[in-house]
Amino acid sequence: EAGVAQSPRYKIIEKRQSVAFWCNPISGHATLYWYQQILGQGPKLLIQFQNNGVVDDSQLPKDRFSAERLKGVDSTLKIQPAKLEDSAVYLCASSPTGTGSPLHFGNGTRLTVT
Amino acid sequence: QKEVEQNSGPLSVPEGAIASLNCTYSDRGSQSFFWYRQYSGKSPELIMFIYSNGDKEDGRFTAQLNKASQYVSLLIRDSQPSDSATYLCAVNDQAGTALIFGKGTTLSVSS
């Protein structure tokens, strides 16, 4: 089966600019996650979708981050305006269900904010 | 605040030795436990998952879970240089929310 697809792989922007990331989960996976991984740390959940509904966005900085999953398939994560501390790898993952299932990760997008 | 704690390492072992990686978690209601391996510059890949107390073996890997002590470990037998990576422990609570990850333990296997 095809894995989780993410684009772009790398992005460099200046602070205060905006950026968007795209993710297409494994076919049939109802649950989609966006994680942020800062260098030297473990992934931190930003938002979890079940189909096209939000399950958990408690750690999403909503003043600058937004995410959507239209039609319950692919998803976009946007940052506007970006800050230096947003430099990280943004990982998209999917699972068949949200309960106890392993997550399958995409290759991630490495964001550098200068 | 639910937490997953790991010793960041680095843990250094010689080739052929057993590597032991440990993880503790704060939420006593946690139900599912996962070990992911992450090579530098790559995304995490699933190694093992365990749901019940005791041991679970898969090839050279053994996951051990002790819910009473809120402790989960990963043993890697006959360690190889290709096992050198960061190992992430992740926990899923009973509400079925997303995985909570530890910071990871860096393992270095020398030949």
Image (spheres, rainbow, N blue to C red):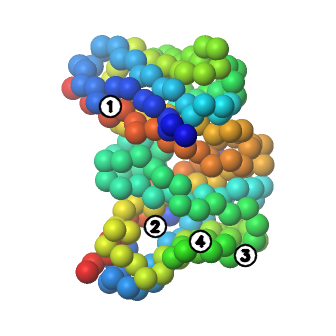
Horizontal side of A28 relative to B104 (left or right) equals right
Which residue was labeled with disc 1? A9
Q: Nearer the viewer, mark 1 or mark 2?
A: 1
Horizontal side of B98 relative to A113 (left or right) equals right
The numbered dot on residue B54 is 3
Task: Respond whether the residues carrying marks 1 and 4 are from the same subunit.
Answer: no
Residue type, label 4: Asp
Which residue was labeled with disc 2? B7
**Tags 1 and 2 touching, CB below 8 Å:** no
Query: Disc 2 to disc 4, how far (Cα)?
Result: 23 Å
Percent position of residue B13, x then y: 35, 81
The 10 Å Cα crowd at callout 3, few under 14, some 14 to 19, many 20 or more, is few
Residue type, label 2: Asn
Read off the chain for label 2: B
The correct choice, above or below, for A59 with respect to A22 in the image is below
Percent position of residue B100, x then y: 59, 48
**Element marked by disc 3:** strand
Does residue A59 show up? no
